[in-house]
Image (cartoon, coloured by chain):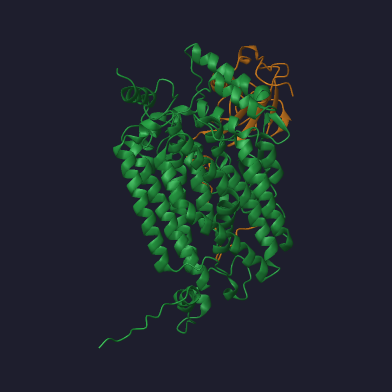
Chain colours: A orange, B green
Amino acid sequence: MAVAAIKDYIATPRDRVENFHGKQLVYASWDRHLLFAAPFLLCVPPGMPFGELVSGPLSMLVQADPDAAAIDWHSVEWLKANQPWVPDFAASLEANGITHKTQLRFRTPGLNSLSAAA
Amino acid sequence: MDMKVTKKKLGLKEKYKLMTRDLGWEPTYHSKDEVFPYVGYEGIKIHDWDKWEDPFRLTMDSYWKYQAEKERKFYAIIDAHAQNNGHLNLTDARYLSALKIFLQAISPGEYAAHKGFARVGREFPGVGTQVACQMQAIDEIRHAQTQIHAMSNYNRYYNGFHAFADTRDRIWYTSVARSFFDDSMSAGPFEFMIAIGFSFEYVLTNLLFVPFMSGAAYNGDMATVTFGFSAQSDEARHMTLGLECIKFMLEQDPDNLPIVQEWIDKWFWRGFRVLGLVSTMMDYMLPKRVMSWREAWNIYGIENGGALFKDLARYGIKPPRGWDDAEKAIDHMSHQFMLGLYQWSFGTAFHSWIPSEDDMNWLSAKYPDTFDTYYRPRWKHIKKLADAGTQFKNYGLAKLCQTCQLPCVFTEPDDPTLTCHRETVHEGETYHFCSDGCQHIFENEPEKYVQAWLPMPQLFQDPINGDLGEWMKWVSLLDGKDNGDYAGSEDQKNFEAWRGLATTNQ
């Protein structure tokens, strides 16, 4: 459906990738770890290797959870845009198909210190 | 010689006719369509504007008299409150967080409603409608002013009140309320009436005002109670206008039904989201609580709302699409919000805190099915971190919903352990949502919502480019004063010291 309007309704998105000076937004969340109230918003360059995103900002952000130290990053299950997916840790975000505003999720079955078992 | 003057006094009905209906005339220089260009494009068909009923039959002269009287009483009490250190009668300065959110997000909404009603008062052709909208426009600006005046007393003593206009325009959480009103004001006049007049004023307003004003009374805030009373008689008129408007649309033409239903679905969900923070005020921010959010929802949502939609069923109106999802969220939302506010409190112009053991016991009694299972373990862990001197601060800023602009803190309707992830691609861009309700609203009018100014993504664009310190300056947030944990804040220290002076001999 279109917006009801009296003339042509032309809209410009406010957060296109070119506004981020060579970087892009990536969203990341740790399923069933709701100590973190919402998915994280990260602003990173598309050339960053996936492994660096994980060992850098993501590992830092999840530290407050008691399960954080027990994460084995190479055995976690990943979802990209809500679909199961296997990342290449050595390749860049771009080569992994992680574009502007992609949502990544990861699951760590068995780690659920703060979560009621689902 | 005495002349006997027969003073002719107009009857109420006569006066109303003269001072409203008779003000309308048939234009001759321009066509009616040119004079009222916005009344047709939404697809609502109106055949007879005279069928609009205004049960209050209030005319501008009496309106002026009533309002002036209320203003005099209001300011007399506000003055007394200020002169007698009314702020020290509060139960506790934690209460002020609820007020700060109200001032930053809701009072500007009153002003936005003023602009909206002034506009639709001009855009509707019917005279009864024009007069009713004009009065509501004046009411709304009065509400904004009295609220600001009532709360300005607190600004002399406490942090977080000093820059509410910057906060309204720039800080991340107020964009929720702002986008709600911008959405309604950029819609046509009929949709505006459903959005504000019906969904907000009629269906949802009791959830905001009754708990909020009772909360003020329970917590010793005379200033806020006073503006609540001053606004209350207006609210009755506003609710009537909203209800009259929807009945009028539905009675004028059967083709209006599907359009009105779609608006009710949209604005119920938007209203439910924007008022969600009230749940947190009720369950966490009032030191002396009135009732739980769940209890308020049972009365004002299920009972009153249920009766309303039963009444509207004769027109073919169904309860809003998001009704069942709303019900499923009630026992979770206040906890989800407060956990978010606490971990992002470095970026809020109000304080939040870890609930005390007593508070948690109250919450588990009010939410027997959810609090101990899902939320107490998180609070206990957060308390442990705070006790160890490593306060939990989540610097991974939040993903926001493209429609309601809230952080995506909500869980799946049927699984409280899993965050609700929803996304869609429109013209090559990905958009994220907090819920099916918000995704549905976006997909109905994507061109409208792709323009959303989402504060978190904006933080990484010009001119802030990800600099948190610059951002704080830009939103007029004083780090270490306005923000952070209530425990150890200036507000806490000052309140306790001043109250100590008033109640002890130290």
Quarter of the figure that contains the N terminus of chain B:
bottom left
Whether residue A13 appears in this view of the structure is yes
The picture places residue B109, in percent across and down from the top left corner, at 47, 49
Q: Is residue B457 left or right of residue B253?
A: left
Q: How many marks?
A: 0
The picture places residue B40, in percent across and down from the top left corner, at 58, 70
Q: Which residue is nearer to you in this view: B179 or B466?
A: B179
B230 versus B224 height, above or below? below
Quarter of the figure that contains the C terminus of chain B:
top left
Q: Is residue A13 left or right of residue B430?
A: left
Q: Is residue B319 left or right of residue B240?
A: right
- Identify the residue at the far left of this view: B1
The picture places residue B471, in percent across and down from the top left corner, at 40, 34
- Identify the residue at the far front of this view: B1
Whether residue B162 appears in this view of the structure is no
Q: Quadrant of residue A30?
A: top right
